[in-house]
Amino acid sequence: MKSESAGAGGYLVCERWPVFALMMLTGGYFGAFTYTIRGGVFCNAQTGNFVLLAMALGRGEWVRASCFLIPITAYCLGAFVSEAAGNRIGKLHLIRWETALVLFEMLGVLLLGALPETAPVQITQVLINFMCSMQYNTFRQAQGIPMATTFCTNHIRQVGVSLYELLAGRGGDQARRLGAHLGMLGAFVAGGAVSAFLCGQFLGRAIWFAEIPLGLALADLLRADLGKEREKLEQLPHGH
């Protein structure tokens, strides 16, 4: 299904800045959580795991190399599931897939916070890999600007591009883009900073504080799904 106009405003609620900022903050929170107290790894993206996989293969560490296939597979599966679900949830005329995803993440966070500290860290890593993959694949554009809500690499690149365009006198909407990407980076850093602090206070229970930004996003999305965007549940956001 092709993306259509979302009416006078041009964009669905799931494409607007407040929702993306909350999801970006959550991404930073997850990254700091797993690195701080769940194995010293980042589960938001998979480049690091591929590097470690390659290094293990180069050293002939076959068992260690096979371990990296677990988070990589979980990430791949997350993208697969989000594609499959995203094309079907709206047709049920209940809520949008974006809303269902945030609800799923909240349930996942609830489960992770209930795990004992003695539980294998791989449980947390795999579930957050899965959730971050679905989030990355689902929230793609914020009001017409391509975005990633689980890592920062593209935002940093776009800041450099926008700065160059502005200095070269080719402004256009580059100031808006620059502000958008800087804002997303700020949200990510804020989420990571809060997570690192709370992990020192609450250990694994600190993940429950991620329910706050997710809950705010869910409330915004539900208001739209059950109200003004009730007739647009099958409409795909821009970028899909």
Image: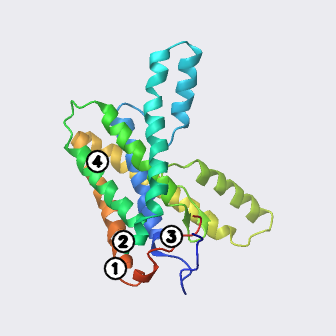
What residue would you read off at disc 3? 15
Choose mark 1 or mark 4, whichever is in front.
Answer: 1
Assess disc 2: are there few (<14), some (14-19) or many (≥20) residues with their C-alpha within 10 Å of its C-alpha: many
Q: Position of residue 150 (x, y in %)?
A: 48, 51
- Give 224 or 161, whichever is nearer the viewer: 224
What residue would you read off at disc 1? 226
Choose mark 3 or mark 2, whichever is in front.
Answer: 2
* Comes first in the chain, label 1 or label 2: 2
Give the numbered dot on residue 207: 4
Query: How far separated are the C-alphas under marks 3 and 2?
Result: 15 Å
Secondary structure beneath dot 4 equals helix
Give amino acid for label 3. Glu
Q: Visible in this render: residue 77?
A: yes
Query: How far separated are the C-alphas under marks 1 and 4?
Result: 29 Å
Query: How far separated are the C-alphas under marks 2 and 4?
Result: 26 Å
What residue would you read off at disc 2? 95
Assess disc 3: are there few (<14), some (14-19) or many (≥20) residues with their C-alpha within 10 Å of its C-alpha: many
Secondary structure beneath dot 2 equals loop
Q: Position of residue 229 (x, y in %)?
A: 42, 81
Query: How far separated are the C-alphas under marks 4 and 3?
Result: 25 Å
Give amino acid for label 1. Leu
Residue 223 lies in quadrant: bottom left
* Comes first in the chain, label 3 or label 2: 3
Assess disc 1: are there few (<14), some (14-19) or many (≥20) residues with their C-alpha within 10 Å of its C-alpha: some
Secondary structure beneath dot 3 equals helix
Q: Residue furthest top?
A: 60
